[in-house]
Image (cartoon, helix red, strand yellow):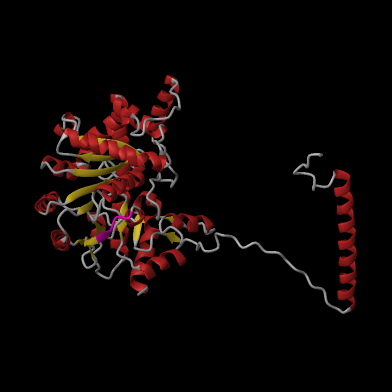
Amino acid sequence: MASSSLLSSVPSHSASLSILDTNIKGKLKLGINNFSNLRSSGRICMAVATNVSRFEGIPMAPPDPILGVSEAFKADTNDVKLNLGVGAYRTEELQPYVLNVVKKAENLMLERGENKEYLPIEGLAAFNKATAELLLGADNPAIKQQRVATVQGLSGTGSLRLGAALIERYFPGAKVLISNPTWGNHKNIFNDARVPWSEYRYYDPKTVGLDFEGMIEDIKSAPEGTFVLLHGCAHNPTGIDPTPEQWEKIADVIQQKNHFPFFDVAYQGFASGSLDEDAASVRLFESRGMEVLVAQSYSKNLGLYAERVGAINVISSSPESATRVKSQLKRLARPMYSNPPVHGARIVANIVGTPALFDEWKAEMEMMAGRIKTVRQALYDSISSKDKSGKDWSFILKQIGMFSFTGLNKSQSDNMTNKWHIYMTKDGRISLAGLSLAKCEYLADAIIDSYHNVS
């Protein structure tokens, strides 16, 4: 008996062509007849097949409140436009600035012929050593006793995100207390990490200053073991920092309540011009024997915005716990981004590790911080001389760092943009790092108009 193939029912190549040819001819003839019938009746019908995407249910995300400002600025064709939205340093000519010391560090990397191999999960060892010492001081006991777990992160944002993931996994139910107001991305970071948060009072609109009593009261009333997010220096967006005496009282309350201080240090050396002065708040808490989390960024003080270099540091009470914490930070980082980029980390390590470059960096930081202080003074002088209403604008000089919190509301901020082509965040924050001396009078006119003529 002849065997029967499973493919015996499949027609041959020539038979398939014959069948196909017959089918096509029949369908063409039917289609022509139908078209003729429809045309003779004065009707032509067209059927359009549409594919509904399975992503139809995903809504459009709103523009980022900070980065969206730059997009709107770029679309504006007016010559007088001014971008005071994004916190990025500009020269007096309002151009991006690459530090000379960064260029020298990059040349040093080229001369050494350094490769682009993967870093370990925790990052570049030389960078981790340098960043911890910059934060706490090279002779700090916590460093010498190996009680600091440092993992290189993706700038300040990524480092905060790693810290948030650590909280979510190992402190279930813990809440984070965030200042009101705060940097626009803080809440996003903890939301995505599924860490609940609430706010503590910080800004007093009546004085355009610090609501210190409200801050202390809210920290006191938080449940024991709350993580309190603190801005190490140059509070964003207000530019309002506690005094050294107030920092002592804040530390008292956090220690009494057994809270966890979690510092965001984005401007070390860039606020006052001194690396040590801008790290004083963190060093105060560590010196009291408190366990502390600290996220660092080198976007501002070294101008490494696009390199995404920073670190998460966990200061523990024992070297054993620091080792365990570091192992878990690495475990969290591995599925998140595997390992960090090397270029920016090498720049930092080379600068800090080379005395001549380190001194040059400190001089350039002083120059950048000094330029911002100069335009801050010039803006105050312009507003004070132009505004005859008697309003006290001295809060501009009391604030520190690259931002000034103007006290303008959303409608007034909209007027700044719509009428004066000055782009800023809707909470009234302006970046003085994006202001030149030549533009101070124009900005003063815009602020006075918006404050007095827009309710």
| 35 to the left or right of 86 | right
Q: Would you say residue 303 sits in the magenta stretch?
A: no
| Residue at 33% across, 45% down | 156
Front-lying residue, 67 or 122: 122
Image: 173 above or below 233: below
Q: Residue 205: x percent and y percent?
A: 24, 66
Front-lying residue, 107 or 62: 62
In which quarter of the view is residue 173 placed?
bottom left
Residue 135 showing in the rendered view: yes
Residue furthest bottom in the image: 41
**Start and end of the magenta stretch?**
194-198
| Residue at 39% across, 34% down | 344
Q: What is the magenta segment's predominant secondary structure? A: loop
- Which of the image's four quarters has the C terminus? bottom left
In which quarter of the view is residue 39 placed?
bottom right
- Which of the image's four quarters has the N terminus? top right
In which quarter of the view is residue 298 placed?
top left
Front-lying residue, 428 or 13: 13
Residue 449 showing in the rendered view: no
Front-lying residue, 162 or 411: 162
| 260 to the left or right of 442 | left
Q: Residue 222: x percent and y percent?
A: 17, 60
Q: Residue 441: x percent and y percent?
A: 37, 58
Image: 141 above or below 388: above
